[in-house]
Amino acid sequence: MGYRVVVAGATGNVGREMLNILAERQFPIDEIAALASRKSLGTECSFGDETLTTKDLDTFDFTGWDIAFFAIGSDATKTYAPRAAKAGCVVIDNSSLYRYDPDVPLVVPEVNPEAVEGYAKKNIIANPNCSTAQMVVALKPLHDRARIKRVVVSTYQSVSGTGKDAMEELWDQTKGIYVPGQEVEPSVYTKQIAFNVIPHIDAFMEDGSTKEEWKMVAETKKIVDPSIKVTATCVRVPVFVGHSEAVNIEFEEFLDEEEARDILREAPGIMVVDKREDGGYVTPVECVGDYATFISRIRQDSTIENGLNLWCVSDNLRKGAALNAIQIAETLGNRVLKKG
């Protein structure tokens, strides 16, 4: 016996990945519905060997459905998530709308699986920001061993994190550089993204940080430990898929790099590729389509008493979004719903 499952936003990058991963992981499904806005109504989506035709999100009745994966952005989620939750359907939301709500669990299954049990307050579970998700998978096993005091992270985030229009802008600008007269001015981003990097993701806040940077701070505290201090600089780079992060960690206790490497090798969801030679590390191109969060360049930081540096890479459409959402559903099923 399986679940009746809804994917809202099925025509977007994350929605399509959700359908792919549900099929790949053979999530127990009796019936599935792909939902989209009216402008995408009737669009066909692949689900394993099946082809689904999208239904209208605005008129869809969630009564009798078990789980709804939302990948439709905060504005639409504000309208439709409460409607689904009230109908008895558990919402797993990929937007930022509910992440900081104390009555909504924010879950990364490798880190805080027990948190899913708090879903019943609003019938909603939040999926974290893509850059946070991969980082906390790496931080948690190290925190359990030596307690993290402070994290300094610089991110190198791919354009797929912004959506399909951003991917097209990178592609068109790249072609335009080589073809005179076909230059493409920025429209998705504030500056040219092709052959460039932009130290600006999401809106600026009063203290000079961006909202993306604030998200990493707030979400790490909620998921791992509120006592951890985090400072982030988030940068958009001309990569189609795959987020990378340079992470500096200060611990309360000394942690040797060899022990850290062994701990990470045994940790769930992590693949360590760390050879001190040419190519002995993972880049975003190599992580695309993979479930793992890859860790490389693990080394002692001699400038502080108990410090480590590491390099963290993951497919942001998978672990940073769709995969984590499906893992939340699997955890919910194992701990609470128990079907299939």
Image (spheres, helix red, strand yellow):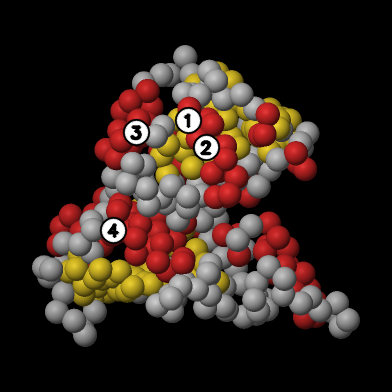
Q: CA distance from mark 4 to mark 2?
A: 25 Å
Residue 83 picture location, percent across and down? 54, 31
The reply to whether callout 1 and callout 2 are in contact (CB within 8 Å) is yes
In the rendered view, tell whether residue 340 sits above or below residue 277. Answer: above
User: Residue 40 shows which numbered tag?
Assistant: none
Residue 117 picture location, percent across and down? 30, 33
Q: Residues within 10 Å of mark 1 (few under 14, many from 20)?
A: many
Q: Residue at x 37, y 52 (%)?
A: 100
Q: Residue at x 39, y 34 (%)?
A: 122
Q: CA distance from mark 2 to mark 3?
A: 14 Å
Q: Residues within 10 Å of mark 4 (few under 14, many from 20)?
A: some
Q: Residue at x 63, y 41 (%)?
A: 9
Mark 3 and mark 1 lie on one chain; the one further toward the N terminus is 1
Secondary structure at numbered mark 3: helix
In the rendered image, which residue does mark 3 sit on? 121
Mark 1 and mark 4 lie on one chain; the one further toward the N terminus is 1
User: Residue 81 shows which numbered tag?
Assistant: 2
In the rendered image, which residue does mark 4 sit on? 221
Name the quarter where the C terminus is drawn: top left
